[in-house]
Amino acid sequence: MTNPILAGFYPDPSIVRVNTDYYLVNSTFAYFPGIPVFHSKDLKNWKQIGNVVERPTQMDFLGDRVTRGLFAPAINYHKGLFYITCTQIDHRGNFVMTAKNPAGPWSDPVWLPQVQGIDPSLFFDRDKAYIVYNADAPDNKPLYAGHRTIRAFEFDPVENKVKGENQILVNGGVDISKKPVWIEGPHIMKVGNWYYLYAAEGGTSINHSEVVFRSKSALGPYVPYENNPILTQRGLPEDRKNPITSAGHAEFVNGPDGKTYAVFLAVRPYEGNYYNTGRETFIAPVKWQNEWPVINPNFREIQYQYTFGFPEKKQENTPPQSGNFSYITRFEKGLDKSFLFLRTHDAAWYKTSRKNGLVMRLKSETCMEKGHPAFIAKRQQHTTCTAATSLKFTATKPEEKAGLLAFQDENHFYFICKSIDDSGSPLVQLFKGTNSEKSMDLLEEVRLPNKQQVVDLKILADGAKYSFEYTSPNGTWIALKKDVDGKHLSTQVAGGFVGSVFALYATSSGTSSSNTATFRSFTYSGSDRVYNK
């Protein structure tokens, strides 16, 4: 079993087992469609079978920065029905959605205005259900920055509404005298006669951790485990080889062998706290010690590989999600479920076909704004990787540009594209995102032969260095600019909660246009050194 089991920007995992099937979901923030649904038989081979938010009528994220939108979904199953609880931050807050089939379609959201906070999760206990979530400090009077509570309502799963008043289950964290911060991502499970409440603590960065409490009642009082945290990577040597950091936001599940496992988020920095691939989904075994669960009990460091004692069950037509892998799409079967748009979906500006690939109409919106540009993306899933496209495009004015983005957010990106200068001569250009919604910095440009309609574009990532290439008319790769600062695409620099993506992108930069760009293929290849054995 190779970690991460879902490489790239797949944070905040939540998992549920139904008979012999496993279903897992992740946060997507302001990307659309929202909340991917993965299926597995063995906790190793994961296949995306759908998305929870796939219709603009369910919700959209127009006007939101890319790092806002949907926070921390949780998936549950009860009496033939799947439930998703989640937070639409900055807008209507918490909601629940249901489906008979986890592949969809999912219902429209039912909003839960009484649940004031983030990270809601359901717990079904015989004839009762509860919704547990992160909330404000008691009486909205925090004793220190990051002081939060875990609260719960009783929940009616038929009417999809809360009952009664909320109750505080945890105040502050494990030990409020030590000023613990950001207790969040809570789940409740029952094992034997104990109810276990477990949650993340310390904030979703290098101080991230997972802690656990238990009680004889679903609504407490809860007592913390004396050896908390049950998972963290803080305090380890900073110079260790191939570090995994920021581990937390876990959920437990029983494996095919009856043993307990945990999925959780963590990151793979290439230097210090710099990483571009976002928070990813990892797995580790759980050991029960004196009726307490401990994650990764035999090691201090999270391992890149674990050996599990149950058989692998591969699924047909399942693209790899872990280790080193490559793929190419020529769009002959349309767009698969992992492609991402910004904030909503409108198929009027693009089409796919076996003959032409992906044809995108240039839109006036840019990736620097908070609208819905002509932007179709795949996640960066490796620290060392390449992304390339074969582009057929002829600009009619300098504002028209089409090409390939390495994109972290509206201000942190690189854009290699084809365009023209004021005299109409074709160019390949490289731009860098700035703190502006209207402009980007030109880093390099070269003139192409006038008759070169097709140009291949490539981005090569290697930790903190990104290089950009294009092809000559005879197909030879030419370096446009080497070793550009990749930290510009890191979460450490950009802030927020997302990871980098590679996007096919076409814009007329605020002007009207009827022009189109044809992307004949998209190729990705990732090869991180830790897997090269």
Image: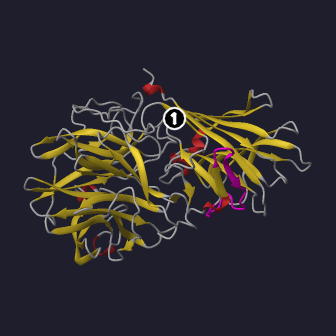
Q: Which residue is mark 1?
A: 383
Query: In the visual, does 465 lie left or right of 479?
Result: left
Tell me the quarter of the image containing the N terminus: top left
| Residue 338 located within the stretch drawn in magenta | no
Is residue 367 visible to us here?
Answer: no
For the residue carrying disc 1, how many other residues have a C-alpha within 10 Å: few (<14), some (14-19), or many (20+)? many
Query: In the visual, does 166 lie left or right of 288?
Result: right
Decide which of 151, 57 is in the foreground and name it: 57
Q: Is residue 404 above or below residue 343?
A: above
In the displayed orientation, state which residue is furthest to the top: 533
Decide which of 337, 11 is in the foreground and name it: 337
Q: Give the colouring mode of the picture.
A: secondary structure
What secondary structure predominates along the stretch shown in magenta? Answer: loop
**Amino acid type indicated by mark 1:** Thr
Magenta segment: 353-372
In the displayed orientation, state which residue is furthest to the right: 423
**At 32% from the left edge and 35% from the top edge, which residue is drawn?**
302
The residue tagged with tag 1: helix, strand or loop?
Answer: loop
Residue 431 position in % (x across, y down): 72, 46
Residue 336 position in % (x across, y down): 52, 48
Task: Say which quarter of the image contains residue 227.
Answer: top left
**At 43% from the left edge and 46% from the top edge, which residue is drawn?**
279
| Residue 363 located within the stretch drawn in magenta | yes
Q: Is residue 429 above or below residue 135?
A: above
